[in-house]
Image (cartoon, rainbow, N blue to C red):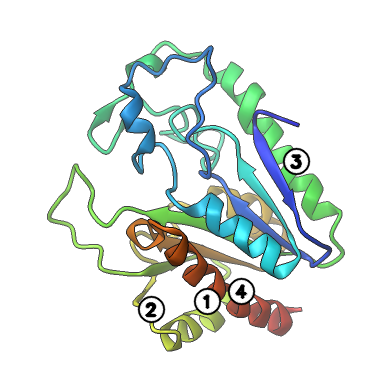
Amino acid sequence: MSEAFTVLRGGDLNLLIVADHASAHVPADINLGVDRTLLTDHVAIDIGVADVAALLVEQMGCSAILGGVSRLVIDLNREEDAPGLLPVMSDGHAIPGNRSADLAQRMIRFHHPYHHQLGRMLAAMPSPFILSLHSFTPMLASDPDQQRPWDIGILYNRDDRAARIAIPMLEQAGLIVGDQLPYSGQLLNATMNRHAEGNGIPYLGVEMQQDRLADAAGQRRYADILGPVVLDCMARLA
């Protein structure tokens, strides 16, 4: 057991589901200086992702690693020298407790163990494929005029092999798909850059619209759609 991550194991399929922002947990000894209600907001957690990951683990017989703390404690999907690794502002919300926080301590406590475990899990697979799961808010509080109409976004940096397979399949399933939307994986892809692109491991980076994951039916719908898409990507990129 680790406070930095949770591992789910459902079988031996060479698929690792990665969910950097699956948790809103803030350890009792860390004071972010924010109202507790903010921990239910997208700035603290990728809403619905942990549930979809658990469904896919059971459905596909694979494994998953879920980040164990809120992205407000430390952002696991950031390079070790990146701005926003220890956020002091997020979508217009101040995080005053982070202004005097010890970044090195949080890295040692959360960031390093998470990424080391992720690497170990991949190393144990003979031919791994990664499904990276995130969710996004349909409206940013800091930019309410920005339209985000997509049901799902597919993100990548240089390796778009799985993206090119998945996008038409997701469109055929009836989803409005954003290619490098609501933002580009060329700008924000740290975990996949490190573990997938950096090691030649094929992956599919997914951003699900959080309002579509508000209940069990929505979570099941996305899991049922993503499962066959991922299996097709794996088969064609093996």
- The residue labelled by disc 1 is 225
In this view of the protein, can residue 92 be seen by the observer? yes
Disc 1 on helix, strand or loop?
Answer: helix
Local SS, label 4? helix
Mark found first going from the N terminus, 2 or 4: 2
Cβ–Cβ under 8 Å for marks 2 and 4: no
**Could you tell me the amino acid type at mark 2?**
Leu
Q: What residue sits right under mark 4 in the picture?
A: 227
> Looking at the image, which residue is at 64% across and 50% down?
194
Q: Position of residue 19 (x, y in %)?
A: 57, 50
Q: Compute the Cα span from label 2 to label 3.
A: 33 Å
Q: Nearer the viewer, residue 16 or 10?
A: 10
Numbered label attached to residue 79: none
Which residue in the structure is indicated by mark 2?
175
Please say if the residues under marks 1 and 4 sit with CB atoms less than 8 Å apart: yes
Residue indicated by mark 3: 117
Q: Quadrant of residue 215?
A: bottom left
- Residue projecting furthest to the front: 216
Mark 1 / mark 2, whichever is N-terminal = 2
